[in-house]
Image (tube, helix red, strand yellow):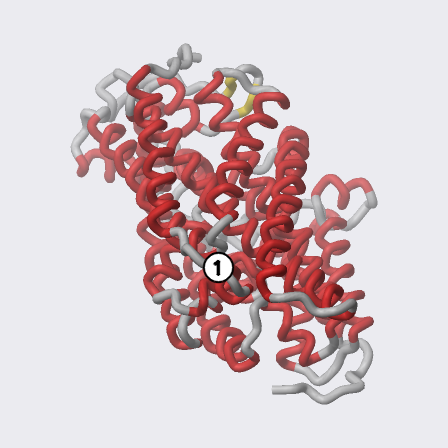
């Protein structure tokens, strides 16, 4: 493959400017007094809808989107963009059903609602499942960013370079969240998102200027490729259960995924609970969905243009570059190859900053959200049974909790290095797949709590475990090893989530409820 380009002074200047902006922004937006857990974990309940929307968008658009969406566009079409239909359907359910209940109950975490329906023990188990799932997902996303940073900054790919890159990302995220809690996270997310989006736009412009064909020629060439494929296709109408972004998968599993993400994952729900009221939180959620569409379209379009740049000599007037898929023995996305071999000095530094911004925005939000669950649902009830402490004590405990969670996510990032090497999944699918393990049980439990009068604390615990185990058994390698029917050995993650949710729901409602539902 083409020799990778090394960093220049211009690249390092851009990176230094990025960290200077973060430090200045962190100082300007840092609250000077954070005395209560409501201030620390919910920013005092004063977040406007537009800022909540930007923060949700920043947290969901991770390094997996930055690297994975261009790779999906290069290999496929716009069908991943259509998955936003599932995002919208999930958002409608969360905005109309879950958010009003959360505000009515005046909860700090999404799982406190289960205390009213079942018991504090049920809440702790749900919170624990979230912590496990978010460590899985957060660690995987840190890994994806770390491998890109290791390639770009050190020109080496190894377990050691991944460890150091991941550690740097976790440390940066921790520092920007430590003092101000969610308020710092929200304003930091705004800065990160502007950088993240700006770097992607800069690459798109540079890439487009590198292609001599006209816009009309490019559109025609994408609509009718030499292989007879329409790369401008939006909806995949196939019914195969191995297609993660078919229309069937979108209206079922993808909708469930984003219902859980926005309404049962404290990382997202925390931002919506930090608004003034339920209506403002719902508006923030809808705004984030609307903003997601052009952002995802931008990254997929980069992938389509990379297809033209590398695979269409007719549109490149014969000047097509060679596309490599390996770097130091490491499989990489086509976007990483382009960054390493084609992007000029300065812009390469900006892209590195964009990847870092995506990772930091995702990680610092996860640290604060997981710490809120760890402290509010686990440590605080334990501590108050042994004598209450001032609210300020729990703010300090939240900071310690973030440190512990950061170490756990770093461990998962390193584990993902080996996991990904054993998997044939693309970056997007890998990042989304790891979220399914915890979401299946949570969805089953919440559906039982919301729509039935059945279930006990014991069945909640069993359902959470049943969802996790079901998804584990449906992993292709495991399914083949234990001899599951052929139709179940290649299920895409949306259909794994559907089956896991159904199993968890049935387990949860198996016994009748000894208590009435509390509205």
Viewer-closest of 237 and 436: 436
Return the residue at label 1: 34
Judge whether residue 82 can be spotted in this image: no
Within-10-Å neighbours for mark 1: few <14, some 14–19, many 20+: some
Residue 481 visible: yes
Task: Looking at this view, name the residue that lies furthest to the top.
Answer: 3
Horizontal and vertical percent for residue 4? 41, 14
In depth, the one of 57 and 220 nearer the eye is 57
The local secondary structure at tag 1 comes to loop
Residue at the image position 48 percent from the left and 17 percent from the top: 154
16 vs 68, left or right, is left
Q: Is residue 173 left or right of residue 380?
A: left
The percent position of residue 33, horizontal first and vertical second, equals: 45, 58
Quadrant, the C terminus: bottom right
Query: What residue is drawn where x is 40% and y is 73%?
Result: 276
Q: Is residue 463 above or below residue 366?
A: below
Q: Quadrant of the N terminus?
A: top left
Q: Is residue 275 left or right of residue 403?
A: left
């Amino acid at each position: 493959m083409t020799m990778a380009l090394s960093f220049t002074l211009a690249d390092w200047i851009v990176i230094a400017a990025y960290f200077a902006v973060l430090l200045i922004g962190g100082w300007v937006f840092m609250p000077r007094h954070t005395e209560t857990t409501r201030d620390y974990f919910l920013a005092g309940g004063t977040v406007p809808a537009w800022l909540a929307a930007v923060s949700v968008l920043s947290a969901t658009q991770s390094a997996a989107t930055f690297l994975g969406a261009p790779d999906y566009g290069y290999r496929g079409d716009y069908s991943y963009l259509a998955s936003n239909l599932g995002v919208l359907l999930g958002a409608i359910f969360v905005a109309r059903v879950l958010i009003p209940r959360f505000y009515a109950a005046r909860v700090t975490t999404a799982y406190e609602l289960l205390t009213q329906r079942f018991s504090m023990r049920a809440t702790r188990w749900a919170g624990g499942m979230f912590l496990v799932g978010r460590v899985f997902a957060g660690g995987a996303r840190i890994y994806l960013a770390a491998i890109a940073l290791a390639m770009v900054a050190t020109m080496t790919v190894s377990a050691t370079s991944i460890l150091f890159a991941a550690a740097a990302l976790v440390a940066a995220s921790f520092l920007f969240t430590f003092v101000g809690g969610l308020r710092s996270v929200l304003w930091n997310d705004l800065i990160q998102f502007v950088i993240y989006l700006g770097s992607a736009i800069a690459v798109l412009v540079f890439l487009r200027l590198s292609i001599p064909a006209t816009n009309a020629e490019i559109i025609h060439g994408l609509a009718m490729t030499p292989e007879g494929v329409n790369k401008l296709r939006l909806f995949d109408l196939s019914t195969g259960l191995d297609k993660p972004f078919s229309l069937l998968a979108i209206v079922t599993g993808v909708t469930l995924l984003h219902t859980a993400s926005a309404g049962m994952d404290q990382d997202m729900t925390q931002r919506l609970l930090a608004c003034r009221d339920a209506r403002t939180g719902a508006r923030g959620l809808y705004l984030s969905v609307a903003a997601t569409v052009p952002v995802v379209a931008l990254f997929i379009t980069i992938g389509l243009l990379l297809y033209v740049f590398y695979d269409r000599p007719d549109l490149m007037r014969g000047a097509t570059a060679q596309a490599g898929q390996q770097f130091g023995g490491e499989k990489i996305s086509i976007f990483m190859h382009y960054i390493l071999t084609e992007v000029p000095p300065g812009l390469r530094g900006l892209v590195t900053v964009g990847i870092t911004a995506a990772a930091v925005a995702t990680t610092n939000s996860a640290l604060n959200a997981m710490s809120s669950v760890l402290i509010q649902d686990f440590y605080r009830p334990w501590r108050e049974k042994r004598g209450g402490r001032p609210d300020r004590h729990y703010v300090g405990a939240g900071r310690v909790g973030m440190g512990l969670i950061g170490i756990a996510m770093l461990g998962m990032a390193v584990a993902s290095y080996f996991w990904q090497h054993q998997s044939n999944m693309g970056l997007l699918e890998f990042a989304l797949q790891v979220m399914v393990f915890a979401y299946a049980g949570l969805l089953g439990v919440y559906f039982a709590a919301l729509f039935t009068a059945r279930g006990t604390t014991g069945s909640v615990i069993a359902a959470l475990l049943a969802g996790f185990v079901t998804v584990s058994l449906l992993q292709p390698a495991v399914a083949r090893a234990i001899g599951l029917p052929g139709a179940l050995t290649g299920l895409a993650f949306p259909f794994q989530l559907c089956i896991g949710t159904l199993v968890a729901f049935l387990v949860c409602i198996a016994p009748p409820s000894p208590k009435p539902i509390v509205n």
